[in-house]
Every structure is written in C-alpha cells, then in structure tokens.
Image (cartoon, rainbow, N blue to C red):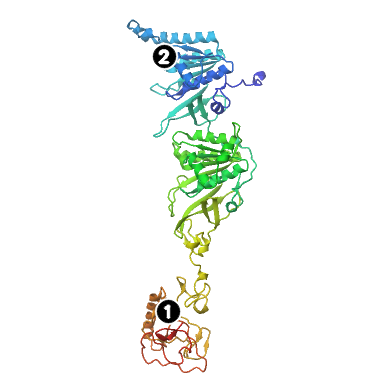
Amino acid sequence: MGESSGKAAPPRVATGIPGLDDVLGGGFTPNRVYLVEGNPGSGKTTLALQCLLEGLRRGETGIYVTLSETEAELADVAGSHGWSLDGLTVLELVAPESELEPDNQNAMFRPSEVELGVTTKAILAEVERAKPKRVVIDSLSEMRLLAQSPLRYRRQILALKQFFIGRECTVFLLDDLTSETEDLQLQSIAHGVVSLEQLAPEYGAERRRLRVTKLRGQKYRGGYHDFVIQTGGLDVFPRLVAGKHDRGRKRGLLQADKKELDVLLGGGLQYSTSAVLIGPAGSGKSTLALQYARAAAGRGERAAVFAFDERVETILERTAGLGMDLTKFIESGHVTLQPIDTAELSPGEFAHHVRRAAEGGDGRPSAKVVVIDSLNGYLNAMPEERFLTAQLHELLTYLGHRGVVTFLVVAQHGLLGSHMETPVDTTYLADTVILFRFFEAMGEVRQAISVVKKRSGKHERTIRELSLGENGVTVGKPLRDFHGVLAGTPTYRGPDAALKRPEDERRTPRSARGSGPGATTDGAGRGGEPGYPRCGGRPLPRLHHHRGSLPGGGAGGRGGRRDRRGRPRRPGGVPRGAAPDPAAVVGFPPDRPHPGGARVAEGVASVGRRRAHDPHEPPRASLGARQHRPRGPAGPPATVRGPRPPGRAAAGRGSPPRGAGTIPGDPGQHR
C-alpha cells in the first residue's frame, strides 16, 4: 500500500495540440479509454490524427481503425494538413465492394451477433499483432447499429475497455452523435469525454468550440474553448483565467510626451491599468491611443494595436498626416498593427492573440501597451453579447498582471447633445475613463477632453480643448469661460481671447471698445457708478433710487435729497403720464439708439401713469443722465403748472448749468 501511494504518476499523453494540452492540464492520463464526440464536420478525425502523429513523433506506435472511411480518404485528409500517414497502421473495416452484388445482398443483413463479432475480432487481432500505444476507433455509430440493442452495445464497449486497459493502450473512441436519442452510456463508461461543437452564425464563418465534459482523477479547465481548423490541424484557444497569471509586476508611469496631456492625467497613466476612451466618432480617441503607443515605442517598448474598424493603410496615412509617422517603429518591431475581421474571428481567438502579444515570442519582446480599437467591433464579434463584460474583465485583469497599459476605444452613438448612448457599459471595469466631446463655439465645431475617473492617482477635473493638427495631439488650456461643454451647446462667459481663432476673426475685446458717449467699463455703470444694470454690453437706466443732488433743495441724507416727510426727492422734468424719448432716457445720441430703449420708454411711461393718480407725489424728472445741482443757494422747488410737451425740461433752478452737454432738441436733458 505504501509503495503504491508513493509511486510517481505516469507522464501524460500529449495530444500534439498545445491549447488542448493546456486545457487538460498537460494531456490525457495514459492507458485509459476516452470518448471524443461531436457532430459531423466538428473536427473529430483531425484531432484523432494529430494525437496519433504526436505519439509517432514520440516513438509510440498507433492504429487507426476506420469503420466508415476508406484509407484513401484518410490519406487525403492528412495530406491537406501537410501530414503523412507513413508509420501508422490503418485498419479498414468498411464493407467491401462484393457486398453490393445481388448474390450477397443477404450477407449485409446477417444476425447482429455474427456481424458484430466479426468486427470486434478483427480489431482485437490487429491490436495483438501491432501492440500499439495509441488506438483510434472511428466511429462507434457503426458498432451501435450492429449491436441493435443498448444492452448488447454497452456490454461490447465494456469488453473492449477491459481488453485495451490490459494491453497498456490509450484508446480514443469517436462518436458522431447520429443516433436518434441522446446516448449517455458511452459517457458513463469512458474515463474522459471531450465534446466538439460547430456553430453557424447568421453572418460570417462557422465557429467551433470544445468542452471537457468529464475527466476522472485529473484537474482541467472547464467551460467552452474556441478552436479553429486550419492547415496544420486544430488550434485551440483556452479560455482565459486571469487568476493563474498573477505576476505582481512593478508599476510605473506611461507618459504621452505631451505636457498638457500628462498634466491632465496627473503625470501619466500607471502601468498595469486600463483606460477607456469614450466619445463620439471622430473626436480623437484613436489618435490619442496611437500617441501613447508611439511614445512607448520611442522609449524602446513594444505596443500592439488591434484594429477592428480601420485598415492598416488608413491608420498609417492618418498618423503620417498628423506628424505621428509609425513606419519606422513598425519596421523595427516596436509597433504591431493587426487588423481584426469580426466576421472571421471568435472572441477566444482574439483573446489568444492579445495574450500572445503580451507574453512575447517569435523573437519579439512582450508588449507594454495594448490598444483595442474599438470595443464596438469586439462587440460585433460576440455571438452573445451578455458574456462580453465577463470576457473583458478576464482580459483586462490578465493584462494588468502582465504590467500592460490597455486602451479600450468606445464609440458612442450620436455627435452632439445630451443623448449620447454607449453600446456597452465598461467604464466600471476600467481604471481610467477619458471623455471626448464635440462642442460649438464661434461658428466652429471643436473638441474637448476631460478625465472623469482615475483610480490610480490624482488627475485634473478641468475640461480642456483638444485639437488635431500637423503637430499631432494638442491639449489646450482649461475651458473655464464655458458652461455646458459636455452637453455640446455651451454658454460662453469670458473674453474672446480664450478661444483659438484667426486674428482677423477675433471679436473686439470689451476693454478696447470706444470711450465716447455711452461707453462704459466692466466695473462701473454710467458715470462711474458701480453695479449699474447692463444689457448687451451697454448700461440700462435706473428706474429708482437716483443718488446725488436733485432739484428742489433741502437737506438730504444718504441716497440724495429728501422732502419734508423724509422721502427721497424725485427728479422732475417729465410730465405725468408722458413717455420720454428713448434716446433721451438712456442717454444716447439719436444716431446711436440703445437696443433696449423702446422697452425702457414703455416702463417709464407706465411709472408715470401710476404717479399721475397720486396728487401728493412730486413730479418725476427725466431718467437720463444725472442732473447736476448748480452752485449757489438753493431756490424754491420748481412749480409744475401742467403737463409739458415731450422733450422739454422744467425751467428753474433745476436746469443744468451752462456748458453742460445736451441732447439736440431737448435743452432740458443732458448727458
């Protein structure tokens, strides 16, 4: 008992398919019976031939027992993959041509025990003669038909199993699943079961996948694994399990060699992280990712770009036009551009290509930057998109363990406005989210960039202008004078110089406007009064609370002179119920009327009509420019004898002093 427990496990039986050996944990346990099942065309015969040829390469003899195909057909299949069957024994048990003659028709329908016994006896005799280490029986459908009953069929398979185990032989039984009902008897007898499937999507090439349904006493990788049949045999792409590739890579900063861009991202992107570049089509996402790839290649690191949407020629022409030529880096092997055809590539195969780039090989170093452009194309390659998030999580985690910076380009539906839709939400999977937007300003469509998420460090929360030109990617200053940039229709709240415009298209700055009549500054209203209401860059008249000296004399406190009841004195000069001239009210000459003068005049007339019903209210003066009190003793208040025609001011001591500027046609109003 102790000797048997301490005995070393025998070496595994390699299949000659690296991906399948990885799924099986190194290969099959020797001297056991295994079942390989699948629909016709799924790749059973090719897999079996690879196993036999791998054993022949290792010095192990093999026999291929065919019950449905001829030896010539098997030779043609092997030749299509560049193989030769020399060294292998092919036992052909197909009914001979003589069975088709009329005199021998009854021989094809002999009792089942006779037919099955003859077939089994021929197989056992050849095994005893050749003493092989690997045997393939193709296929069991013929033996099932010969047995005619499930009980006899099961007993025959059990007898074969006991025979082969006693001969130290590894046997592969092929079943094409052509029975009318699902038969699980073979699965219960076999030591392990490998199921092959062939799927036919609505568009694109067929897709194949395999699954290890059963494997006794051995740990294997479960789930479905994509594979393809190409020249040279099966190529299996094991399902990616990120937890098995934790390497604890040292982290650093990946910089784009663009100062403003690196400042926006807090110095750069951490290695072993992922970044999602999300925005509408044409906003600069792919170009920004290529800028990072080019910067890494310039420092001697390798970058791998997987292009789902663009041709390689288009990428090279675009980068050359932006001053970001990638030709020399492609020739040196520091940048690889691999186009991906979504109609021909399965998700498992794509993950295998990314893994191969991250691990290196074929004389190339491992990649430190991986660009997937775009995730929309990757989504189209998925037959069932509900598994996309899970596969992306495994892929990003694996690349993070390898110390790779991954860029995922996601194109949103729409160009402007708040109705921007994303085909799949992957922002919570990524460590950094960079947002791109179009916005309208100064009659142009501009681009903006911002960082809305970064797990690995600090970053700017500003929105900056992004431009693409001959110098590549240019990130401008923060757009602090705009509000609503992310919505696409911002409101501008600053000077024109904040935006980059040609010199001839710039609007005149506010500080450079004229200083003539009506001109004001930003900090003062008319006459240097701070906080005066403005409209369209020009002052609006005050309807209440005029400060300063008013006609009528009397001691006044703060806010101007007051009457006997302590109320502020109202300026005179405007008849009750009369609407003054808009130009006179605002204080503009006739050739430069105020844009809001009509509305102001209507408001003044309304106030005048209300005051006309109050006999105790003093008459209201013009609401134009501030009137000045003449020097000298104050006289009695002006007597209002009745309404005056518009445009005339009251006579008396409230008249403006000599030399004051006046509006033509109205000597009582001055500017």
Mark 2 burial class by Cα count in 10 Å: few <14, some 14-19, many 20+ = many
In the picture, measured across the screen, residue 261 lies left or right of residue 339, that is right
The correct choice, above or below, for 442 with respect to 617 in the image is above
Give the image location of residue 223, x and y in percent.
50, 31
Query: Between 45 and 368, which is closer to the camera in this rendering?
Result: 368
Q: Position of residue 555 (x, y in %)?
A: 52, 90
Where is residue 42 shown, x and y percent of the image?
A: 45, 25
* Three-letter code for the amino acid on which mark 2 is drawn: Ala
Circles 2 and 1 in contact, beta carbons < 8 Å = no
**SS at circle 1:** loop
- Under circle 2, the secondary element is helix
Q: Is residue 138 shown to the viewer in this render?
A: no
Can you tell which mark lies on residue 452?
none
The residue under the point 64% across, 19% down is 4
> Of 6 and 524, which appears nearest the observer?
524
What amino acid is labelled 1 in the image?
Answer: Pro
Disc ID at residue 147: 2
Q: Position of residue 138 (x, y in %)?
A: 46, 17
Q: Quarter holding the N terminus? A: top right
Q: Choose top left, top right, bottom left or bottom right for residue 69.
A: top left
Q: Which residue is mark 1?
A: 589
